Image (cartoon, rainbow, N blue to C red):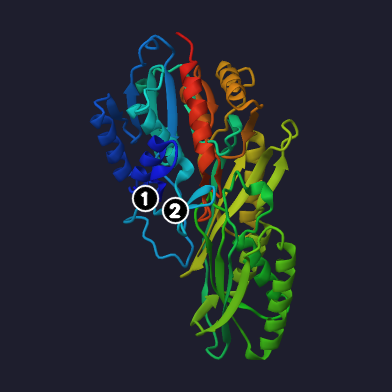
Amino acid sequence: MSELKDLKPGSIWKNFERINAVPRPSKREARIITFMMDFGRSLELPTERDEIGNVIIKKPGTSGMKDHKTVILQSHLDMVHQKNKSTDFDFDKQGIPMMIEGDFVCAKGTTLGADNGLGVATMMALLENEENIEHPPIEALFTIDEETGMTGAKHLDASRLSGELLINLDTEEDNEIGIGCAGGVDVTFSKSYQQEKIDAKLTSRTIKVSGLNGGHSGMDIHKGLGNANKLLNRILFSLNKTINVRLHTFEGGGLRNAIPREAEAVISFDSKDQDEFKNGMHRLEKQLLEEFSTIEENISIDHFEVATPQSALSVSDKHQLLATLYNIHHGVYRMSPSISGLVETSNNLAKVEVKNGKIELLCLTRSSVESGKQDLSNQMEAIGHLGNLKVIFSGDYPGWTPNPGSTLLKLTEKNYRAQNKDEPIVAACHAGLECGILSHHLPDVDMVSIGPTIRGAHSPDERAKIASVQKFWELLKAVLADIPKK
């Protein structure tokens, strides 16, 4: 055990360290699936995996609760792998090293995996039940590939489950009870471009935007954080209005559900335009630093000379690309008119890759209203057509419609009040919880979502509030002890 060994509740932090020692990127979860299967069997509990790779471990109710309603506890096994460019780390070979900073647990330049590793670790703690916790029959459902397509939830073999209630452990505020979430769809733009040979005497520069906060493209989309792809394109578009810029490469961002933190491009221009370039960069840097001074304190805009590449995008392809990137919406598209403070529809321009004759742009469009998702998707398709790009929609998943009359919600609210002497926030979120899909597989199952406080999910700034894990644990135990008979 590391310095986390003295944290409470020990059973959760112990198991969180165990799973963080196992590489578990989305779509490559074989090692964590094997780990979880071995874990269930080591407890001599019925343990199985369905065809897609979800793991289900069942545990009978404790004495006096064997005839109470069965509860499905659900978390996902995969995590977002993001790191700072300066961090030397191999996610496929290394476990996540953790440390304590003040009131939080965090990682060292990488994502922490608290999303949804703390939920997984909590379920493991209940299955081990070292505290002799009173609970009804439990079906622990560990799904795969939540972060890049919700594949596990989509292809769940629901016939393996018999629970009447479901508690998802993927909410990221310890005072919140989730009862709804957004649906989403992946949008991919692509095309091939002409590579033209250029004058080797041109001056070439790399322009880099870095140091942004990044964050979760659902939960943080309303904060007005900088998107490195959009900011870099703004710089290129503006420079191109005053000097003849030749574009060689543009690379920024990564996963669809992470707001891009870094982006860089290689450009060339006539040597006589060097002063105009430097003046333009100075002006644009000043503008952006002023605009984002209160929210992106570490933003950095740099440029440095590089060797001139042999070829660049054609002038027409360059103009089309920069215009397309300017037009692709990033951020909140519409706020909900019926739920105060809820983002209804949004888009994240997650990744730009322009090199070797290929353009690929990745987005994630979210909405809690299906028609709103379709409206923004139509806009994206229209932009793609204007930019002469192929547009593909994939990974479409539904939202989770709120049920304010939920019996499980009332029970969870009651126990939260008793524990905290305060009112919980009952809310729908703009993230893509698996409950939206699971509710289609399990239409008669009553669901809520709870969890500990996590900040900066999907970015290397991810951190989990230590005290909130204990608070969340106490609430979950109280709810389980209060589950009624069948």
| Amino acid type of the residue that numbered disc 2 sits on in the rendered structure | Met
| Residue drawn at (56%, 72%) of the image | 265
| Residue drawn at (33%, 17%) of the image | 60
Q: Is residue 483 above or below residue 235?
A: above
Which is more toward the observer, 295 or 65?
65
Which quadrant is home to the C terminus? top left
Q: Is residue 227 left or right of residue 113?
A: right
Q: Residue furthest front?
A: 6
Residue identified by numbered label 2: 99
Position in image of residue 299 (x %, y %): 63, 66
Q: Secondary structure at mark 1?
A: loop
Q: Secondary structure at mark 2?
A: strand
Q: How many marks?
A: 2
Gap between marks 2 and 1 measured at Cα: 8 Å
Q: Earlier in the sequence, mark 2 or mark 1?
A: 1
Within the image, what quadrant is residue 178 found in? top right
Per the rendering, the mark at residue 110 is none
Position in image of residue 109 (x %, y %): 47, 60
| Residue drawn at (52%, 32%) of the image | 472
| Amino acid type of the residue that numbered disc 1 sits on in the rendered structure | Ser
- Tell me the crowding category of disc 1: few under 14, some 14 to 19, or many 20 or more residues within 10 angstroms, Cα based: few
Q: Are marks 2 and 1 in contact (CB under 8 Å)?
A: yes
Within the image, what quadrant is residue 225 found in? bottom right
Residue identified by numbered label 1: 2
Residue 410 in sight from this viewpoint: yes
Residue 121 in sight from this viewpoint: no
Position in image of residue 386 (x %, y %): 65, 57
Position in image of residue 327 (x %, y %): 68, 58
Q: Is residue 134 above or below residue 430?
A: above
- Tell me the crowding category of disc 2: few under 14, some 14 to 19, or many 20 or more residues within 10 angstroms, Cα based: some
